Image (cartoon, helix red, strand yellow):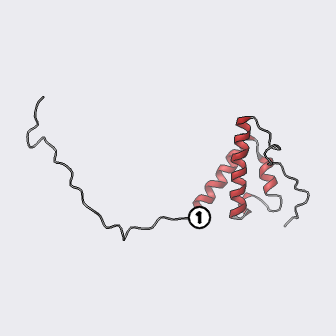
Amino acid sequence: MEELSGAQRRDKPKLRLVDNSAAPTAIVDTEDDEITRASRISRIRWLAKSYKLDWLVEQHCFTVPGVESLNPESLRSLHKDMERARECIAEGISFDEVGLVRNTSFQESA
């Protein structure tokens, strides 16, 4: 085995402690920021188009003009239901069986 000369040999890295007290703190809740909201809406639209889940969007938006008008909690709920519906389709489970189909006749309009 050939030994490397001094110029070819790499020195071991020198490790040192870094003071991270000035580092920015992690953002704990990003659920309502504009980027996350836009991503959720985009994903909801894609799921509705790809899996024919428009009915689920209409069910959630029964009292509001559209997805953009949903409050953050309702938007998260719709997104969760859309993902659940996608899983139901993949696994062959009916939407009624998991409680995704709801009676909207009792909801008051805005």
Left or right of 30? Residue 2 is: left
Which image quadrant: the N terminus? top left
Vertical order, 66 against 9 (above or below): below
Give coordinates of residue 50: x percent, y percent.
Answer: 70, 40
| Residue sitting nearer the eye, 4 or 43 | 4
Vertical order, 109 against 45 (above or below): below
| Residue sitting nearer the eye, 106 or 40 | 106
Q: Residue furthest right?
A: 105
Residue at screen point 18% across, 48% down: 12
Q: Residue furthest left?
A: 5
Residue at screen point 51% across, 65% down: 27
* CA neighbours of label 1 inside 10 A, class few (<14), some (14 to 19), many (20+): few
Give coordinates of residue 57: x percent, y percent.
Answer: 77, 52
Question: Disc 1 designates what residue?
Answer: 33
Quadrant for residue 9, please give it. top left
Q: Amino acid at mark 1?
A: Asp
Callout 1 secondary element: loop
Give coordinates of residue 79: x percent, y percent.
Answer: 69, 53
Which image quadrant: the C terminus? bottom right
Residue at screen point 71% across, 35% down: 91
Left or right of 16? Residue 5 is: left
Quadrant for residue 3, please give it. top left
Vertical order, 105 against 1 (above or below): below
Residue at screen point 71% across, 48% down: 82
Left or right of 45? Residue 4 is: left
Give coordinates of residue 65: x percent, y percent.
Answer: 79, 61
